[in-house]
Amino acid sequence: MVKPVVSVLFCCLGNICRSPTAHGVFESKVTELGMASRIYTDSCGTGGWHVGEPPDSRATNAARQRGYDLSSLRARQVQADDFQRFDYILAMDHQNLQDLTAMCPGNYTGRLSLFLSFAEGAREEEVPDPYYGGAHGFSHVLDLVEAASDGLLREIARAHPAR
C-alpha cells in the first residue's frame, strides 16, 4: 500500500463518543471517494479512562442507523508522537483544543484546530458531548460531524491534490 499523503487525528475527552464518531464517518467518506490510500484516519482522547474500550453503544447505534460502522474502533489516549504522525489534529471542543495545545511541541507543522472549523455555515464551534444526554445528542453529533467531514475533505483535496 502507498503511504498515505495526509493523516487526520480526531480528539475528544474519552474517545468513546465524539472522536470515534468523527473517525468512523470521515473514514467512510474517504473510502466512498476512493481516497483510502491517500488519507489515514485515527481518533484519541485527552483522557485515558476508556483506553481499549469500544465506542459508547449509543454512538455506535446512532452511527449504524446512518450506515457507519464504529465496531472496530477502540479508545486510546493522545500521545506525544501523534504530533509527528498527524497532519491534522482536530479537537471536538475548546477544552480539548486547549489540552492539545499545551502538549503540542513548538515545531509541529500540521494543523491543530477545532473540527467544526471545517463545517461551512456551522452555527456552533464545538461538537457537544452527548454522553450525559439522550439519543438526540448523538444524532446531533452525527449532523455536525458529517458537515465538518465534508468540509475537511474539500480542504484536503485543495491543499493536497492527487499526484
Image (spheres, rainbow, N blue to C red):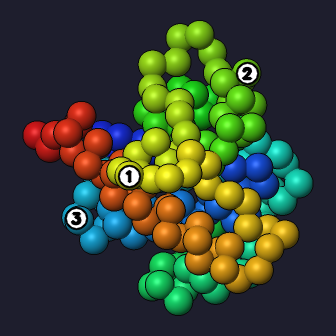
- Secondary structure beneath disc 2? helix
Which of these two is toward me, 123 or 107?
A: 123
Q: Is residue 60 above or below residue 46?
A: below
- Secondary structure beneath disc 1? loop
Which quadrant of the view contains residue 58? bottom right
Of the numbered discs in the image, which one, if any, rests on residue 121? 1
Mark 3 or 2, closer to the camera: 2
Measure the alpha-carbon separation of dots 2 and 1: 29 Å
Of the numbered discs in the image, which one, if any, rests on residue 34? 3
Residue at 70%, 83% (x, y): give it: 135
Is 78 situated left or right of 85 in this image? right
Q: Is residue 41 above or below residue 24?
A: above
* Residue 18 in view, yes or no: yes
Disc 2 designates what residue?
102
x, y percent for residue 49: 88, 54
Name the N-terminal-most of marks 2 and 1.
Answer: 2
Mark 2 or 1, closer to the camera: 1
x, y percent for residue 45: 73, 48
